[in-house]
């Protein structure tokens, strides 16, 4: 039986595969993107999505 760490590793692997298929390459390390800034933007987006889902769950629990 897979533990949570195996599931997390699979999710990361799936994202890397998705990027490879979408962009046809690994993460380029020789371009001028600010990977810290891009990471921050992605993390903030994720926080918005999680907050929205938490609100949905709370509202559906309170409605019952």
Image (tube, rainbow, N blue to C red):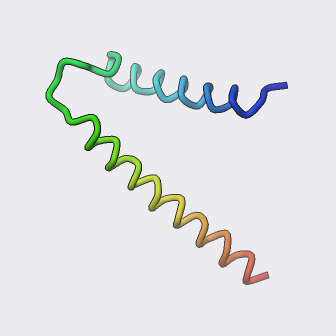
Tell me where residue 52 appears, x and y as whole percent: 52, 66
Residue at x 19% of width, y 32% of height: 33
Residue 52 vs residue 21, the one in the foreground: 52
Residue at position x 79%, y 81% in the image: 64
Q: Position of residue 8 (x, y in %)?
A: 63, 32
User: What residue lies at 41% left-to-right and 21% top-to-bottom?
Assistant: 21
Q: Position of residue 63 (x, y in %)?
A: 73, 83
Q: How far across and how far down the image is residue 30, in percent?
A: 19, 18
The quadrant of the picture occupied by the N terminus is top right
For residue 55, side relative to residue 32 (left or right):
right
Residue 59, quarter of picture: bottom right
Measuring 73% from the left and 34% from the top, which residue is drawn there?
A: 4
Number of marks: 0
Q: Is residue 56 above or below residue 38?
A: below
Along the line of sight, the residue nearer the viewer: 11 or 43: 43
**Depth order, front residue of 20/2:** 2
Q: Tell me if 28 is positioned left or right of 46 in this view.
A: left
Residue most toward the bottom? 63
- Give the farthest residue toward the left: 32
- Judged left or right of residue 33, residue 44 is right
Residue 44 picture quarter: bottom left
Q: Residue furthest right?
A: 1
């Amino acid at each position: 039986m897979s533990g949570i760490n195996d599931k997390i590793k699979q999710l990361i692997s799936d994202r890397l595969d998705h990027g490879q298929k979408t962009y046809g390459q690994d993460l380029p390390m020789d371009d001028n993107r600010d990977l810290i800034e891009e990471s921050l933007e992605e993390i903030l987006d994720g926080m918005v999505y999680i907050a929205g889902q938490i609100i949905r769950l709370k509202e559906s629990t309170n409605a019952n």
